Amino acid sequence: MMKKFGRMRSWGKLAPEFSFALDGGKQSTDDFYRSLPFNRSLILILISAVFLFVFSLPLLSMGVMSAGGDDDSLFSLIFMVFSLLWMLGWSCGVALLLIVFLGLILGRETVRVTENKLVLRIGIPGLGFGVSYANELIRNFRYQDGEVSNENKWRGQHLMFDYGDETIRFGSSIGKQEAEKIIAQLQALFPRHAAAPVDLSSMTAAATAAELEKVDAMEVEQRSAVEIGEPASLVSVSSIALIIANLIPLFGVILGGWEIGEIMLLFWAESAVIGLYNLCKMWRIGHCSVLFYGTFFVAHYGAFMSVHLLFIYVLFGGELVGEGDVSQLQVWVDLQKLWPALLALVVSHGISYFVNFLSRKEYENRSMSQQMKEPYRRVVIMHLTIIFGGFLTLSLGSSLAALVLLLVLKIFADLRSHLLQHTNSPV
């Protein structure tokens, strides 16, 4: 099954689209909707219950451990936050097992036709995993009433159709009379159902490109050049805003007496800003599916940030609080001192979000998994640059010239990542 879908991903615009989202039943935009019978296995229910119990134990034990720390040190805060984020990430796996367990007990399979696509979804009432298929390649709806292969034996009597040169199956234990009624309704919605399957593997490169260009042309007609906008450049609004936001710490160094510790803490906080806007991007791409993907991202990215904060105070904390343990209150005081520069970074990344991601529609043809990975490359490059510059600054005695050099290195690394991200071409 996975090999089949993996091969179909090479079909570009015509490849099946996957989603994990809420399913509230028939919508006003649906041309067809039906909830199908669903076979249940007592053995699979028992196995899933055991897995759910086993995977829930570490979650409970970590909860007990994280409740043990009650001192006011930074290390205690990091441990508590890291534990909570680990629990949040682990709970995603437990939640999936819970959905599988509930699916085996309460599960259903639905089929809907909306916006000229056929959508198959399997899950519990209100929530499920779905795959949508484009009208262009749907052919030959039919009923499987005879011998069933071992791979699909659990379905029993079921429905299927051809998608390209692949067979897609749906439903289980469907009676012949009901199956004929569903097929008749689907045939009316997909008039090319009787045509022969399309063998994409035997199509020439030119024929495949021509097929995909038909889909692309329809989308391009709906988007004017104004809507698409110009890609980011050195003189674009988002690039200028980024440069200005990165210059504000320079005034903090000259007028406010900031040292290397304050600068490192500021750019750590910028990582949180990038993560926040990434959640907004994930919502725009996947909407309700961000409840799962966003939770996992917050857990993983937050754990990365919590360890990074400890790393900053261990290496550069002497410039912030001197010798001795760092209190949680001290961290808050240090962050408050940086609010003008941090606010500028929030505005800068906000401009980039609206100008590039929304106005230029960068969210189109981008998956949730791609968007989840996006912040890491930029943050890692940025922080490798400033950490290298930080050690250089310390070796030079935190002089004004060294701090200015550090800020210049950061601006260069940040601007380069920004342009690569929003132009897809090297600078």
Image: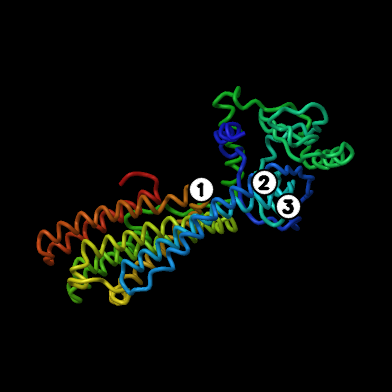
The answer to whether 328 is drawn above or below residue 285 in the figure is below
Q: Looking at numbered disc 3 in the image, what kind of residue is underneath it? A: Leu
How many marks can you see?
3
Q: Residue at x 38, y 52 (%)?
A: 376
Classify mark 2: helix, strand or loop: helix
Q: Position of residue 66 (x, y in %)?
A: 43, 65
Q: Quadrant of residue 125?
A: bottom right
Mark 3 or mark 1, whichever is nearer to me: 3
Nearer-N-terminus badge (2/3): 2
- Residue 361: x %, y % from top left: 51, 54
Q: Which mark is residue 282?
A: none
Q: Amino acid at mark 1?
A: Arg
The residue furthest right is 177
Residue depicted at 21% across the width and 64% down the height:
316
Residue 83 left/right relative to 427? right
- Say which quarter of the image contains residue 201: top right
> 59 and 316: which one is in front?
59
Residue at numbered disc 1:
366
Quarter holding the N terminus is top right
Mark 2 or mark 1, earlier in chain: 2
Say whether marks 2 and 3 touch (CB < 8 Å). no
Under circle 3, the secondary element is: helix
Q: Please give the residue where the numbered disc 3 appears in the rendered image.
A: 106
How crowded is the residue under tag 2: few (<14 C-alpha within 10 Å), some, or many (20+)?
few
Circle 2 residue:
46
Amino acid type at mark 2: Leu
Q: SS class of the residue under badge 1? A: loop
Compared to residue 199, the image places residue 283 above or below, namely below
422 with respect to 216 (left or right):
left
Q: Position of residue 228 (x, y in %)?
A: 49, 53
Left or right of 43 in this view: 180: right
In three-dimensional space, the C-alpha distance between marks 2 and 1, rounded to whole angstroms, equals 38 Å
